[in-house]
Image (tube, rainbow, N blue to C red):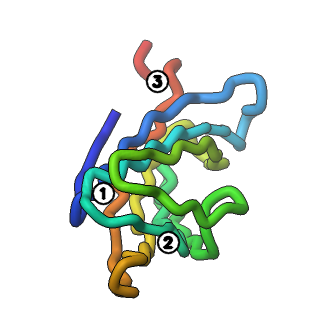
Amino acid sequence: MVTSITQGVKVSVETFFQPDYSRRGEFVFAYRITIENKSENTVQLLRRHWHIYDGIGVWREVEGEGVVGETPIIEPGHMHQYVSGCHLVAPMGKMKGTYLMLRTADGNYFDVIVPEFQMIAPFLFN
């Protein structure tokens, strides 16, 4: 698990290889993200921005509203967790990104870092 904290918002990421959905030339990974609000302010996640790097040098960028169809509001001391996935053409790659957050008390926007995380198929360790 990798973790980062930006302005009191902690983001932790765990990854899981999905062998039942993978086949030669397409490797599927799931990732679980936990967002904990350790600040004193309520925040809302508005947008995501991902940089996805495949093990063979393919790079892509994904940007959009919310996460898995939600724009969660996270009160101080609370958390939001979701699971999503990524398809790669190689059995390894990595992702990193940011969430655009709104601090509801003052209407200020800020970016929260999603730490870089690795996606590696377990058979590569043999």
Identify the residue at horizontal 45%, vertical 43% (top origin).
34
Q: On residue 124, which mark appears?
A: 3
In the displayed structure, does residue 4 sit left or right of residue 72? left
Which amino acid lies under the numbered mark 3 shown in the image of this protein? Leu
Disc 1: which residue = 9
Disc 2: which residue = 49
Q: Nearer the viewer, mark 3 or mark 2?
A: 2
Percent across and percent down for residue 58 are 53, 63
Quadrant location, the N terminus? top left
Query: Is any part of residue 46 visible from this angle?
Result: yes
Label 3, label 1: how many angstroms apart (C-alpha)? 33 Å
Identify the residue at horizontal 49%, vertical 72% (top origin).
49
Which amino acid lies under the numbered mark 2 shown in the image of this protein? His
For this rendering, which residue is in front, 37 or 51? Answer: 37
Q: Which of the 4 image quarters holds residue 5? A: bottom left
For this rendering, which residue is in front, 30 or 48? Answer: 48
Quadrant location, the C terminus? top left
Q: Which of the 4 image quarters holds residue 8? A: bottom left
In the displayed structure, does residue 122 sit left or right of residue 39? right
Percent across and percent down for residue 35 are 42, 49
